[in-house]
Structures are given as C-alpha cells and as structure tokens.
Image (spheres, grey):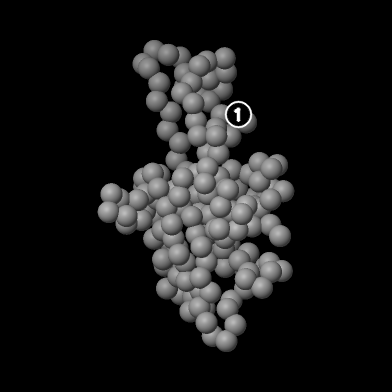
C-alpha cells in the first residue's frame, strides 16, 4: 500500500486520495467515529509551516489543514511539526499517514507513495548571490560551488534537474 505525500497546494486532493486505499484505516471511521489522520508538516518553513518555541504550529499549510478539518465531520487532522528527513521515514513506517510539505516527485518516492502526476505548486525559492557574480538563473550555477541543500528538500531537486 502506498502512503500519501503531497506538495502544499495539493491539499484539496487529500480528501480524495485519503479514501482511496485498500486498508481499513484509509477511509472514514465506522459507526460515526471520527477518523484521526496523523499529518506531518515542516517545523521551520516560514511562512508555509513552522513551530513556535511554545509548540504552536503556524503557517499556511496548517491553516489550510485546519480549515479542511472544520468541514469534515468524520475526520480530524493531528498536525505535527516534523523534520523533513523524519517525515518520509514516518510515512514509510506507518507512523504518519499524510505529509504536507515541499517534497518533489522522485522515482523512489513514486514507488512508495501516492504522488500527484501534475505539479501542484511549489514553495518560493530565492537565490542570493554576490553582486557581480554573473549568476542570474539556475543555469548559471553549472560548475559553481553552492551551499548544501537538505537531501529530501525540493530545492535540491530543482538544482539537480
């Protein structure tokens, strides 16, 4: 059974895909009970999603999930701020059922998770360079040394592509 991973703008797809699995836990709870979906979101991706020092999870992604949660009587989202590397591990092991973050499709992810076939949105990626560097586009980075990216993050995939 593939688990579900989405980009931030694919949240509308959650409702359809969450109910498409063949495991008993993939649909709404029986007998009118509320089905809790364990969701991860990044803890340090302001303005999309971040966790405050006192543990509050804020940002666009959690706000959208909470708005969806208000509309669904049979579902509840337990939103947790989790580091990118732990999100995929948690999805693979079944600890989490849904990730909302900026993961890009890779062949490995497509084998393990339900990934939208069409791009569903991207986080803003800003590139900071020294004045006079001659770097104006991603193509200008070829052959240059750059600051390392998070291995599971979308920025790395953009640069590699």
- Residue 161 is left or right of residue 68, and the answer is right
Residue at image coords 46%, 45% = 83
Between residue 68 and residue 132, name the one nearer to us. Answer: 68
Residue 157: quarter of image: top right
Reading the image, the residue beneath label 1 is 160
Residue at image coords 49%, 26% = 148
Residue 13 in view in this figure: yes
Which quadrant of the rendered structure holds the N terminus? bottom right
Give the structural element (helix, strand or loop) at label 1. Answer: helix
Q: x%, y% of residue 62?
A: 41, 58
- Could you classify mark 1 by the number of other residues whose Cα lies within 10 Å: few (under 14), some (14-19), or many (20 or more)? few
- Residue 155 is left or right of residue 119, and the answer is left
Q: x%, y% of residue 63?
A: 39, 60
Figure disc tally: 1
Which quadrant of the rendered structure holds the C terminus? top right
Q: Is residue 47 above or below residue 129?
A: below
Q: x%, y% of residue 119?
A: 60, 48
Between residue 114 and residue 83, name the one nearer to us. Answer: 83
Residue at image coords 62%, 52% = 92
Q: x%, y% of residue 142?
A: 57, 18
């Amino acid at each position: 059974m593939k688990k579900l991973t989405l980009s931030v703008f694919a949240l509308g797809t959650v409702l359809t895909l969450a109910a498409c699995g063949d495991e008993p836990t993939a649909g709404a709870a029986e007998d009118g009970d509320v089905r809790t979906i364990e969701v991860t979101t990044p803890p340090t991706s302001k303005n999309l999603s971040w966790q405050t020092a006192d543990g509050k999870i804020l940002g666009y992604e959690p706000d959208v999930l909470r708005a969806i949660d208000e509309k669904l009587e049979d579902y509840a989202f337990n939103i947790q701020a989790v580091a990118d590397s732990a999100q995929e591990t948690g999805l693979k092991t079944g600890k989490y059922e849904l990730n909302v973050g900026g993961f890009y499709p890779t062949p490995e992810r497509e084998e393990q998770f339900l990934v939208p076939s069409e791009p569903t949105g991207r986080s803003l990626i800003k590139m900071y360079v020294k004045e006079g560097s001659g770097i104006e586009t991603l193509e200008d980075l070829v052959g240059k040394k750059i600051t390392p990216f998070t291995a599971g993050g979308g920025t790395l995939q953009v640069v590699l592509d």
